[in-house]
Image (tube, grey):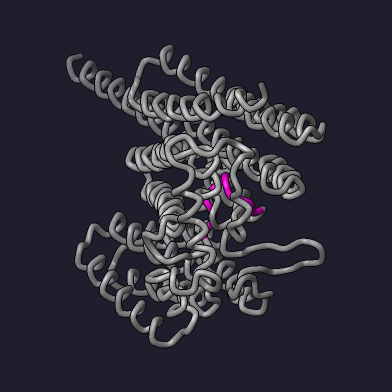
């Protein structure tokens, strides 16, 4: 009976995830509030069902009550997050909040399956991060000086990245700052400061001189990351800057020059740094050293291939064969046990988030907020591309996490901050619209009054 239930769960989970992704896109295009409300409720039910089935399977397979306790604790957390946004931020994007919760639910389930203790740690950090970031939309609306603190963002970011050079090496890269029992990955937070810095500077002016200054300091961020051998973050910073540069200046020449400079810098980095060459060698032919440097990539490809359309079944595969699967190769681990249909639907949810962010950016009336939304959206989308592309051998490995899904305290907190900022701008978009409508109505009334005075 147990084996039958586990076999059926593969198909049920794939169907639920596919249906959730479909609902996400329907929710993005439907304008009727009542219909959208029903879609949001449907999404919440599906998220709860996927989360419940994951922990139920773990309880059946491992027969340990700790999974029951963790399930209920996380269920309360998800309900609290949804209710907080409904009550305190009724104008926030419910779709973005639902997608965030769904991705975290999948991440919690998969991390618990790989390493229960890490799941406990991830959950505690997520709760703490949510408590800290839940006021971000309110702060964004209340504090108007955020757009004027460009040099502060730049200085703080450069100090943190420089400190990383003195930090501990993790898997061959300087990534972590250790403060007593706490280890922090500064690049996860600096990418937000970086976006705020570029947006603030271009909000002041987009002249050639200003562009040259911003480009120089943006390049300094990237250079420090390359020296720290954090190639994934360096790529993200570079691509994000090009996107924000184009949106701010609308100058194709600047973007083209940036691409050429980036290509030249990539060739130079390949010539100068052995770790860059090693990544490319492993990417081109991992099979020639399958028991050494190519082991991680090969195991990732094996996992994806063995998963097929519906997967081995949750808790039935061997995703723990992939080194650091819970961080760098979560997509491969999920595909092995949940299947390609589930994984593709998961990526469609990530794409839905990117589309929502770009839509919010296009509707922001203030250049600063538009640039922040674009920067955060590109950061999120490119990060998903890097981690999935590395897992399927489309691009070299970069060590980038899958937001909300992969294990990592700094990663999940920075992702919470990004989504809170985006939701804050979504709120402000409504407020700006109302402000514009009110101002237009006042102008109309004043013009009508003036015409009446003239007639008299």
Residue 329, percent from left and from top: 54, 55
In this rendering, would 447 be left or right of 429?
left
Would you identify the image quadrant in which residue 119 lies?
A: top right
In this rendering, would 266 be left or right of 405?
left
- Quarter of the picture holding the C terminus: top left
Can residue 288 be found in the magenta stretch? no
What residue is at 45 percent from the left and 78 percent from the top? Answer: 276
Task: Let me know if residue 296 appears in the view.
Answer: yes
Q: Is residue 50 above or below residue 243?
A: above
Would you identify the image quadrant in which residue 207 lies?
A: bottom left
Q: Is residue 324 above or below residue 340?
A: below
What residue is at 20 percent from the left and 62 percent from the top? Answer: 252
What residue is at 55 percent from the left and 73 percent from the top? Answer: 292
In this rendering, would 364 be left or right of 88?
left
Q: Is residue 304 above or below residue 400?
A: above
Q: Residue furthest top?
A: 34
Q: Is residue 121 above or below residue 438?
A: below
Residue 49, percent from left and from top: 59, 23
Front residue (pair 429, 441): 429
Front residue (pair 93, 302): 302
Q: Main secondary structure of the magenta part?
A: loop
Task: Let me know if residue 428 appears in the view.
Answer: no
Residue interval drawn in magenta: 400-408
Disc count in the image?
0
Front residue (pair 15, 447): 15
Q: Residue furthest left?
A: 455
Residue 325, percent from left and from top: 59, 55
- Quarter of the picture holding the N terminus: top right
Front residue (pair 179, 86): 179
Residue 448, percent from left and from top: 25, 19
């Amino acid at each position: 009976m147990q084996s039958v239930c586990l076999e059926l769960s593969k198909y049920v989970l794939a169907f639920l995830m596919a249906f959730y992704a479909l609902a996400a896109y329907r929710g993005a295009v439907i304008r009727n509030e009542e219909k959208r409300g029903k879609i949001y409720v449907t999404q919440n039910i599906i998220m709860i069902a996927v989360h419940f089935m994951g922990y139920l399977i773990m309880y059946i397979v491992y027969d340990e009550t700790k999974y029951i306790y963790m399930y209920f604790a996380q269920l309360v957390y998800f309900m609290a997050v949804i209710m907080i946004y409904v009550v305190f931020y009724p104008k926030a994007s419910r779709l973005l909040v639902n997608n965030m919760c769904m991705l975290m639910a999948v991440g919690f389930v998969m991390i618990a399956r790989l390493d229960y203790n890490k799941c406990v740690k991830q959950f505690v950090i997520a709760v703490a991060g949510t408590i800290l970031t839940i006021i971000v939309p309110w702060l964004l609306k209340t504090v108007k000086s955020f757009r004027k603190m460009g040099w502060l963002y730049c200085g703080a970011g450069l100090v943190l990245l420089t400190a990383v050079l003195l930090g501990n090496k993790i898997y061959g890269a300087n990534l972590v700052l250790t403060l007593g029992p706490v280890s922090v990955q500064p690049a996860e937070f600096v990418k937000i400061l970086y976006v705020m810095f570029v947006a603030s500077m271009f909000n002041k002016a987009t002249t050639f001189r200003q562009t040259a200054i911003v480009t120089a300091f943006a390049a300094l961020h990237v250079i420090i990351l390359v020296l720290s051998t954090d190639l994934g973050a360096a790529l993200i910073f570079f691509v994000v800057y090009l996107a924000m540069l184009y949106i701010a200046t609308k100058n194709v020449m600047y973007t083209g020059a940036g691409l050429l400079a980036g290509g030249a810098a990539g060739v130079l980095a390949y010539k100068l740094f052995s770790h860059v060459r090693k990544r490319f060698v492993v990417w081109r032919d991992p099979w020639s050293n399958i028991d050494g440097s190519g082991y991680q990539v090969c195991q990732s490809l094996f996992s994806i291939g063995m998963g097929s359309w519906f997967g081995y079944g949750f808790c039935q595969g061997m995703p723990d064969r992939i080194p650091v699967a819970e961080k760098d190769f979560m997509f491969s681990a999920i595909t092995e046990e949940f299947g390609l249909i589930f994984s593709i639907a998961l990526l469609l949810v990530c794409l839905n988030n990117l589309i929502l962010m770009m839509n919010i950016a296009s509707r922001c009336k203030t250049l600063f907020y538009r640039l922040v939304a674009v920067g955060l959206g590109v950061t999120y989308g490119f990060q998903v591309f890097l981690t999935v592309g590395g897992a399927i051998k489309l691009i070299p490995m970069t060590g980038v996490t899958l937001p909300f899904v992969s294990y990592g305290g700094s990663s999940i907190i920075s992702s919470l901050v990004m989504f809170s900022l985006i939701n804050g701008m979504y709120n402000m978009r409504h407020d700006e619209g109302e402000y514009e409508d009110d101002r237009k109505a006042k102008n109309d009334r004043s013009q009508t009054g003036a015409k009446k005075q003239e007639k008299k």
